[in-house]
Amino acid sequence: MLAITYPSEKRLRLLVNLLIIYTYIITSFLMSYFLTNQHLKTSLFYCSVILVAVLFASLAEHSQKNGVLHRLFMFISFSVLFFIYGFRNFSAIDDPSYIRIFELVSHDGFFEYFKYSTMEPGYLILNYIVSLFTNNYFYLQIIRSFIPLFLFYYGFDKLKKIISLPTAVFLLCSMLYFQMLAVSLVRMFIAMGIVFVALCYIPKRRPVKYVFLIFIATMFHYSSFFMIILAYFAINKKNLNEKATKLYTITFFVSPLLFILIGRFVIPLLGSRYRGYGLIDSINLEIGAFTTLPLILLLLFFYKKFEGHEKLYFKIFIFVYSLSIIISVFGAMISLGRLIFYSYSAFILGSAMITKKINFNSYKIMFSSIIIIYGFLYLFYTQFVNPSHVPYLFPYENIFFSI
């Protein structure tokens, strides 16, 4: 029998890919077994969902030259996550509240509900439009689950030439997806999807499109208006090239005053339901506020590998992710810690850019292993073993089955 030989580069690529796949599988199994032994079946199911979504994203990446296959594999990857998220049996923490909102908007109309709730009008209008066709909340759940996931996948596809699709999908799952599955931060997830797409327009220097999308995102969650500061980079290329560090320093020292002003003057305008956000608390200087610093340094380690327009993208992603420290330190002053989820979107893209850029060598294995282990650790400790989230994730309740 003739032996089949591969060029050394092809053998190396195959070996690296196999090592990365084994790292995915072994890490997910070990963490499921040791950390969620009581809910092992459901935990392995969730990990399988992630791995299937990542697998088809990888197939989509390797079939970019074939548009039909690429779109098919991306669609399957998206559909797996959409089915689990969109067809759950109203099992998240905030689902009862959102069912109540839909019922009230259906009965009173979105404007009447807005007058006494001051909830984001974009989300209320979405509720009202759906209520014109049906009084079944499940259809709204499907639509508002589809929107943010579609926006993230749309953003991935727009950047497919400079990011690793499987890395992007994996980090979306581990850092954001299960947070939404457990808590159902509906309005914020939609806003994050819009901001995610908007980030692409900063390196392209299209401030009007960026500001417009931030305005639309604000209509779904007021917190996204915080991201308007990044329009500064979209106005002029030099701002991003030469003044990013200066703006970050200014933002860091101005943030306490900014959050105090928001708490004292802006939040009271949003109505009684936001009153708790206006209570000024202390600055968080605990070590936990700086947990993202090692990851920022990890991204910066690969900074010199990028040139031209790729460098502009990578720089804005590092800058946005670095805002996580400011949000962790000062956001607790007025309970705006959830702003950190916007910065996680930038980490997803920055990490995916590195995975795409580095060659198939020891750096590829090292970086991919760090990302995989970090992603699963973050997922398990913030979701799967989080006492406040466990009752809403285990067992998984779908309208068709339970596991």
Image: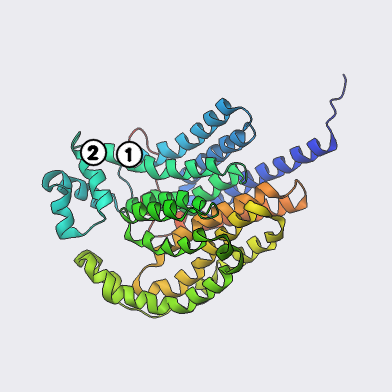
Give the SS element for disc 2. helix
> Which mark is drawn over residue 264?
none
Name which residue type carries label 2: Val
Which image quadrant: the N terminus? Answer: top right
Crowd class of label 2 (few under 14; some 14 to 19; many from 20; radius 10 Å): some
* Left or right side of 187 for 48: right
Mark 2 touches mark 1? (CB < 8 Å): yes
Q: Which residue does the image show at 28% across and 77% down from the upper left?
A: 264
Which image quadrant: the C terminus? Answer: top left
Name which residue type carries label 1: Ile
Q: Nearer the viewer, residue 4 or 105?
A: 105
Q: Which residue does the image show at 41% across and 49% down from the upper left?
A: 194
Pointer 2 or 1: first along the chain: 2
Furthest-right residue in this view: 2
Q: Nearer the viewer, residue 400 or 242?
A: 242
Q: Nearer the viewer, residue 91 or 140?
A: 140
* Left or right side of 240 for 114: left
Residue for badge 2:
130
Q: CA distance from mark 2 to mark 1?
A: 9 Å
Q: Is residue 309 above or below residue 79?
A: below
